[in-house]
Amino acid sequence: MAKISTKNLVLAIHEMTKDKSGHELDVAIQNITDYLAKKRMIPRAPEILRKLEELINFDEGIVKANITYKNIPEKKITDEIEEILMSRYGAKKILAVTNENENVLGGVKIEVGDEVIDLTLKNKINQLQNYLITN
Amino acid sequence: MIKNTIVENLKRQIEKFQADIKAEKIGHVIEVFDGIAKLSGLSDIQASEMVTFANGEAGVVLNLEEDSVGVIILGEFSKIREGDEVRATGKILSVPVSDAQVSRVLNALGEPIDGKGAIKTDKRNPIEKVAPGVITRQGVSQAVQTGIKAIDALIPIGRGQRELIIGDRQTGKTAIAIDAILNQKGQDMICVYVSIGQKDSKLRKLQTRLEEGGAMEYTIIVSAGSSESAALSYIAPYTGVAIAEYFMDLGKDVLIIYDDLSKHAVAYREISLLLRRPPGREAFPGDVFYLHSRLLERACRRNKEYGGGSITALPIIETQSGDLSAYIPTNVISITDGQIFLETDLFYKGIRPAVNVGFSVSRVGSAAQIKAMKKVSGTLKLDLAQFRELEAFAQFGSDLDESTKNQLERGKRAVEVLKQPQYSPVKTEDQVVILYALTKGHMDSVAIDKIKLFEEGLIEYARKNAKVFYKEVIETKVFTEAGEQELVKVIEEFKGSFV
């Protein structure tokens, strides 16, 4: 029998639960848990939950972004960055996770899914180093 | 003064520099094991695309799965850690190609490993390329002279042909390939020797032999040693053919030897099993046929409008206890245009090269064989086959008629003539003389143990005295009646003086 992929499982769970609430939702969740236990898929639960979260976010137009600064700038700038990201990804809302990292030296690094926009000083210096070596 | 110049130069370079700002797709290492990495992310990656790891190592994408990407690591994998960032390069794996690679020893990535310095070139060829189409091709019509009598006479190879060399271990497969390379001196041929999973000591010995024979002047060695990862063994033949294609595109003829494709298939099996691809027959993955067919299909002869170059491929396959019906041998036999089958029994009987003439065949080579050779070797294969049959039959009876006895004697002499020591290729025109003497019965009265001596003496004598014959064969590749008469006279004269 073919292996059930996490993606297919997540799609099924999402379909089962998206329009339900209250007791109906509780029953659906119980059934899903029983199914995962029966099929010995409980160890895959963290991955399933992560993918489910991504799918729900996608459905609701929420984009999760990891934004790294050397020092978190004032709110005006972070709001501006979020607005740019909303228009770039066509999102209704940006779920920004901001981090501070001294190693970036300055600028900002934005990670959305597997896409990275690296505007940090560290990256520019690395590029300059490569440029000077190769030219 | 110098300080100022450096500062000025640096300033100028920095002024010209513009940082590249773009959104990049990146991935992260999920797991690393035995030269394989599984990555998350990299949603836009293509198959066979190169990736770079955080520590600078390169990798090639082989598996595109729903949630992950399977990559083979082309280098040291012990320093790659889980969670490391991986970037896609947007480029299919390519290797540097250049005229300067001739006479060098390269690794599977096309970088020199012979300690003679770096090779500067801007040109790169992708290692995976679709084979030339039908329109660009031409039939095989020009011979590759290997200098081995048994091959040039009975299993001729043409430029653009793919001829498999197959046999058990220690039967002289590599020796045939090396002799073929040694004999290309002055024949306007570039040779590429791809060593897959061979011992470094064997490779060094081979390189020394080629250097001694002056063959490194037109040879490139591509090596993925037995101590290197399976990934490098897997890409080495493709690197070799990418380099060969560079020369073919320049209109040159190239001879490429893959030594050997059994080890290549084993390396690919290892990678495939690690990538969890479903195993099939002998645990090889389902696409092992395509692995070799796409490689060997790149050997061809281009027509004049497309440069007229050619790649002749001599893949080598090692069999286990002479089993030709194993998976990889049958695959490669069906892909190639013929095979040279070497047998352990013949080897230990002292018949070297141990070519089994009955099992060996060249499907297209006869079109490339020169007319002079065709004329003298036409019946040789049949004679030898009949001899083998009679030889077995003669063991049971002592009373044989005259014609059978004669056939047996002729056969014994033919076997003796086709014996040839390693690293001593014979020129085509000399081969024609010897085979003429054999097939026309001039050697019938020579004692079997004197055949070698007779052969050597005859070549020397004929070179001096059969000038018309030699001139005709060298220049027109065929001999006339006048030339033939001269040769007969010379053979008879020599026989008279031969003690």
Image: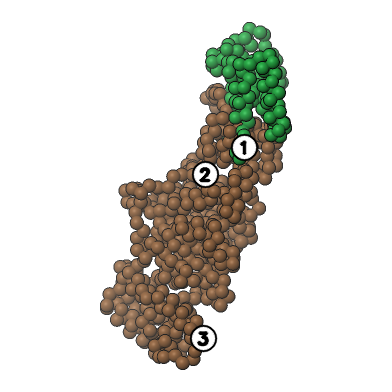
Q: Is residue B363 left or right of residue A109?
A: left
Quarter of the picture holding the C terminus of chain B = bottom left
Depth check, mark 2 against mark 1: the one in front is: 1
Which residue is farthest top? A76
The residue closer to the viewer here, B429 or A60, is A60
Q: Which residue is mark 2?
A: B95
The residue depicted at 70 percent of the width and 39 percent of the height is: B79
Secondary element under disc 2, as helix, strand or loop, is strand
Residue A3's label in the rendered image is: 1
Chain for numbered disc 2 = B
Q: Amino acid at mark 3?
A: Gln
- Place of residue A10 in the rendered image (x, y in percent of width and height, measured from the top left): 62, 26
Q: Which residue is mark 3?
A: B395
Q: CA distance from mark 2 to mark 3?
A: 58 Å
Callout 3 crowding tier (Cα within 10 Å): few <14, some 14–19, many ≥20: few
Determine if residue B243 is in view.
no
- Residue at image position (39%, 88%) is B403
Placement of B417 over or under B81, stated as above or below: below
Q: Amino acid at mark 1?
A: Lys
- Tell me the distance, in whole angstroms, between the alpha carbons under discs 2 and 1: 38 Å
Residue plotted at (61% across, 14% down)? A94
Q: Would you call the spot at circle 1 few (<14 residues within 10 Å), some (14-19), or many (20 or more)?
A: few
Colour brown belongs to chain: B
